[in-house]
Image: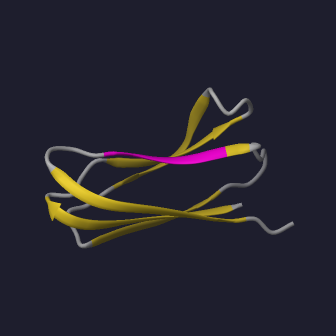
């Protein structure tokens, strides 16, 4: 599977980290990969997940300071 994170800065100083996380039970997630957000207009990262594949994924962003960032996530699975 391929996952894309897009964070668009609306105001403030963008920062923090974004994580691709996987889970088997949709409750307990583990961090699979991470990305450090920079203070730019648009941060984007493509995460590629090879086997093992998890039934549940999420992208989680943890910001720093005072900022407003619009976050979007996309996923593509090709079998």
Residue 31 forms part of the magenta stretch: no
Question: In percent of the image, x 18 and y 53: which residue is there?
Answer: 67
- Residue at the image position 25 percent from the left and 61 percent from the top: 38
Q: Residue at x 33, y 62 (%)?
A: 70
Q: Main secondary structure of the magenta part?
A: strand
* Residue at 64% across, 46% down: 57
Report x, y in % for residue 65: 15, 44
Indicate whether 46 appears above or below 66: below
| Position above or below: 51 against 48 | above
From this viewpoint, which residue is outermost toward the bottom? 41
> Which quadrant of the figure has residue 31?
top right
Name the quadrant of the C terminus.
bottom right
Q: Is residue 22 above or below residue 18?
A: above
Q: Is residue 57 left or right of residue 19?
A: right
Stretch in magenta:
57-62
The reply, left or right, for residue 66 in relation to residue 42 is left
Q: Position of residue 75 (x, y in %)?
A: 64, 63
Residue furthest right as drawn? 79
Image location of residue 32, percent across then percent down: 58, 43
* Quadrant (top left/top right/bottom left/bottom right) for the N terminus: bottom right
Q: Quadrant of residue 55?
A: top right
């Amino acid at each position: 599977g391929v996952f894309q994170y897009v964070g668009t800065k609306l105001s403030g100083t963008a920062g923090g980290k974004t994580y691709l996380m996987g889970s088997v039970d949709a409750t307990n997630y583990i961090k699979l990969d991470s990305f450090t957000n920079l203070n730019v207009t648009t941060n984007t990262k493509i995460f590629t997940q090879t086997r093992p594949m998890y039934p549940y994924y999420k992208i989680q962003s943890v910001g720093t300071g005072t900022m407003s960032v619009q976050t979007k996530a996309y996923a593509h699975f090709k079998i």
